[in-house]
Amino acid sequence: MDKRIKLVIKLVLIFGGTVVGLLLGFRLAIYLAPFLIAFAISSLIEPVICFLMKKLKFRRKFAALVSLLLGLMVIAILLLLLISKLYNEIASLSNSQPQFWKETYQNISNLINKGLNIYFGLPSEVTAQISNMVSNLSHSVTGVVDSFVKGIYNTAVSIPQMVIFVLVTILSTYFIASDRDGIYDYIKRNVPQEFLNKVIDIKDNMFAALFGYIKAQMILMVITFCELSLGFTIIGIKRPILLGLVISFIDAFPVLGTGGVLVPWAIYEFLTKDIRMGVSLLILYAIVLVIRQMIEPKIVGQQIGLHPLVTLMSMYLGMRFFGFFGLILGPITVLVFKNVILGMIKQRSLKELISDFTKK
């Protein structure tokens, strides 16, 4: 068989196999989530286990148990501190802003009254159309409320499943951490070393991409927080630090983003005739949006090891194929492709591949 045909078949098989493997991997990850999380946690507490074994001469099983309990204790304390801090901030905000809520209620009531006066002064044909629109809107709202109630019910029903999920994750973490060497030895005895090395490389790249993406999002959140806090201070909004912190967290969710808060806020200011504040909020939103779009591909690319242009393309294509979750899956998929293909072609460059293909 011609050498070029062999190369094409090999690349097609690599590409197809990688696609199938990724799709199966993402599907299986949903069902294997407790064990994947357990593996990640056991890797994080491994340095503590080694320290306890080396310095305090603990046996591995006991060191794993102590490390896991310490980790759970730290997580519980951090969650309690976070909840307590948020509760105090919200309580303080509610107690110090009674006039704000009173004014907001008054403004909304005035807007409703003005809208009713305008509505009753319109021709009957127009009011009939508006009535139909309101009727359709009410059906939509009813559907949303029903979905919300069903969501609450499903959440309540799934609480036992969540408890089981957490228990399985904790127990799996202990079993993996306490017998890590034995598990690795068993795998090495039953899996070819070359295949194992490739799997380890892919796993390292996926975790590096995932943690790199999280780190990049943290950097973007800090930048957004600084922009919002400074902007709120300049335009004279009270509690700029708290508001900047809350909105920067919301900005981490692609579906919502900064615009999910600032745009409705600006519309409200326009409706209450505070034009200066509405324009200021829109300008601030435009600044935050432009800066984020400019720096996001570069920051994400630096953290996960891809060129900014490749990162931007992978994020866009991932979003087109997988929705907003594809913003994460896109760069990770590209990294997996890169690692698998480089491993299969034995680290040859693209130039060498093209050269082999064009040879007669």
Image: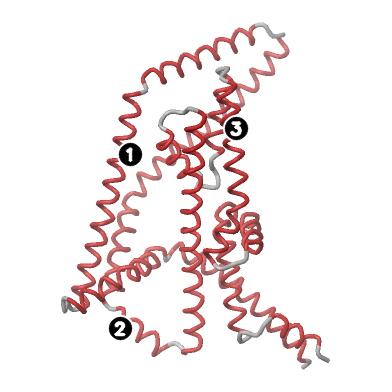
Q: Is residue 237 left or right of residue 1?
A: left
| x and y, in percent, of residue 156 in the image | 35, 44
Q: Residue 86 carries which label?
A: 1
Above or below, 252 against 297 in this view is above
Return the residue at label 2: 182
Q: Which amino acid does label 1 sit on?
A: Leu
Q: Closer to the N terminus: mark 2 or mark 3?
A: 2
Residue lying at 46% horizontally and 28% vertically, measured from the top left = 237
What coloring was used for the rendering? secondary structure
Report the residue that reaches farthest toward the right. 360
Left or right? Give the position of 162 relative to 244.
left
Please, what is the three-letter code of the amino acid marked with disc 2? Gly
What amino acid is labelled 3 in the image? Leu
Q: Say which element carries label 1.
A: helix
Q: Return the x and y of residue 261 as percentages of the image width and height.
A: 52, 35
Q: Single out the residue that lies furthest toward the front.
A: 234
Q: In this view, does 261 lie to the left or right of 42?
A: right
Residue 171 image offset from top left, x and y in percent: 27, 66
Verify CB contact (< 8 Å) between mark 2 and mark 3: no
Neighbourhood count class around disc 3 (C-alpha, 10 Å): few under 14, some 14–19, many 20 upward: some
Residue 331 drawn at (x, y percent): 58, 63
Q: Mark 3 points at which residue?
A: 282
Res. 149 image quadrant: top left
| Up/down of 99 relative to 33, above or below | above
User: Closer to the camera, 20 or 107?
Assistant: 107
The label nearer to you, 3 versus 1, is 3
Q: Earlier in the sequence, mark 3 or mark 1?
A: 1
Residue 266 in which image quadrant: top right
Name the residue located 48 percent from the left edge and 84 percent from the top edge: 197
